[in-house]
Image (spheres, rainbow, N blue to C red):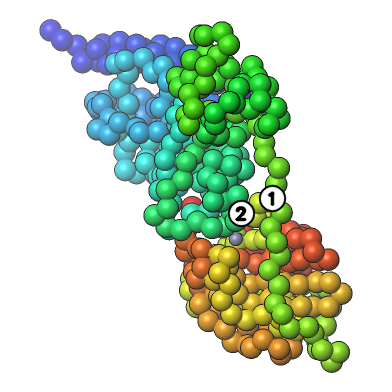
């Protein structure tokens, strides 16, 4: 006769052994990837919980109905069933749920991925999703080099397989000239599996496919400084001046932080949310900006200090007037190059963008949950 208890024990022992094997394989591959190990540990913890429940309750393990489409260990041994998790478990603790915005990128992604921009996306978020630096996404998409904020929903972006410069080979270029141009190592380009799949590295010297992509791991391009858009009205002598103590211009969460190519903060909230002057000053510009800011306000606070408020849906003031600190000046919107309602907020001091976090007084808004 078939003894269900014994069968279960055997099955559990086998499973445990496989789980340990899987952990070892995974560890060997992912020594440098602490976050994935942490996730694996959490995954194993859930499996252990389910196994305990199985022993106590005599439940049957079932194979998972849905294959995971991301974060799949590269060398997953065949035959290991995933588990259906009881609905009473907290879903947020589970790594199996397909939540695209919080997912880790596919490991060993070795191709150039085309990505369609979704509502609310920005370069930082997309880069993090694919495990590359924001600059790498910018460099792979020439249009973005002039304005990294210039994303529109539905736009197609190239995402490089690893961080660095994704480059289209031009006639006459060699591994040496490309490495020199992007300040990278020839060996890193040569050893990249993506490049090996496109170019003929077996020939000596290597033959590059003209117009083919080549990945320059660790490469970089110089930062093109954006011209600071200004209004054309000079502040009169009696214009209000700022106190140099800024307040937050709106209540929101931060959807994109300040970084090299993004000289401000994206403060997300629903369209129509009030936008207030961060400090007293003179309104130098109110209107449409066609470089991507959409409906924009520029306030001159005196002493070489400006604040910019972009993508607005409405204006509450006019150019040429003074505003008090905290005065309503407009409403959050999604005008210009924007993928969802947010305020793009900049502080500029003597021509240099400052990170509002650390400059603005009061409690810094939290990061948006995505
Ligand atoms: Zn922005």
Label 1 SS: loop
| In front of the other: 304 or 105 | 304
Could you tell whether 61 is left or right of 314 in the image?
Answer: left
Q: Which quadrant of the figure shows ligand 1?
A: bottom right
Q: In which quarter of the image is residue 47?
A: top left
The residue at 67%/80% (across/down) is 285
State yes or no: discs 1 and 2 in contact (Cβ < 8 Å): yes
Q: How crowded is mark 2: few (under 14 residues within 10 Å), some or many (20 or more)?
A: some
The residue at 71%/88% (across/down) is 320
Label 2 SS: helix
Tell me if I can see residue 291 in this picture. Answer: yes
| In front of the other: 129 or 182 | 182
Could you tell whether 7 is left or right of 193 in the image?
Answer: left
Above-or-below relation of 91 to 353: above
| In front of the other: 200 or 297 | 200
- x and y, in percent, of residue 318 in the image: 64, 88
- x and y, in percent, of residue 5 in the image: 25, 15
Residue carrying label 1? 224
User: Residue 146 — which label?
Assistant: 2
């Amino acid at each position: 006769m078939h003894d269900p208890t014994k069968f279960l024990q055997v099955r559990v022992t086998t499973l445990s052994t496989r789980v340990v094997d899987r952990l070892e394989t995974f560890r060997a591959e992912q020594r440098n990837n602490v976050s994935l190990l942490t996730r694996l540990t959490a995954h194993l913890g859930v499996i252990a919980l389910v196994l305990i429940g199985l022993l106590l309750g005599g439940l049957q393990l079932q194979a998972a109905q849905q294959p995971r489409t991301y974060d799949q260990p590269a060398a997953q041994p065949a035959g290991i069933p995933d588990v259906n998790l009881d609905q009473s478990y907290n879903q947020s603790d589970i790594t199996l749920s397909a939540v695209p915005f919080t997912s880790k990128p596919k490991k060993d992604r070795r191709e150039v991925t085309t990505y369609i921009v979704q509502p609310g996306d920005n370069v930082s978020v997309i880069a993090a999703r694919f495990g590359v630096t924001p600059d790498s996404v910018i460099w792979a998409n020439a249009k973005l080099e002039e304005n990294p904020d210039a994303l529109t929903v539905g736009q197609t972006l190239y995402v490089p397989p690893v961080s660095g410069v994704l480059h289209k080979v031009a006639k006459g270029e060699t591994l040496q000239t490309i490495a020199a141009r992007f300040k990278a190592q020839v060996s890193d380009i040569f050893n990249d599996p993506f490049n090996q799949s496109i170019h003929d590295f077996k020939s000596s010297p290597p033959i590059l496919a003209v117009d083919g992509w080549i990945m320059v791991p660790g490469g970089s391009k110089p930062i093109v400084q954006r011209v600071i858009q200004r209004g054309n009205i000079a502040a009169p002598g009696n214009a209000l001046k700022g106190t140099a103590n800024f307040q937050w211009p709106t209540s929101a969460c931060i959807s994109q932080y300040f970084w090299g190519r993004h000289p401000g903060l994206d403060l997300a909230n629903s369209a129509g949310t009030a936008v207030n002057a961060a400090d007293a000053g003179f309104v130098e510009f109110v209107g449409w900006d066609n470089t991507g800011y959409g409906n924009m306000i520029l306030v001159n606070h005196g002493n070489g200090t400006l604040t910019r408020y972009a993508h607005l849906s409405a204006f509450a003031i006019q150019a040429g007037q003074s505003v008090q600190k905290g005065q309503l000046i407009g409403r959050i919107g999604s005008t210009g190059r924007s993928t969802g309602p947010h305020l793009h907020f900049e502080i500029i001091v003597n021509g240099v963008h400052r990170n509002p976090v650390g400059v603005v007084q009061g409690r810094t808004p939290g990061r948006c949950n995505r």
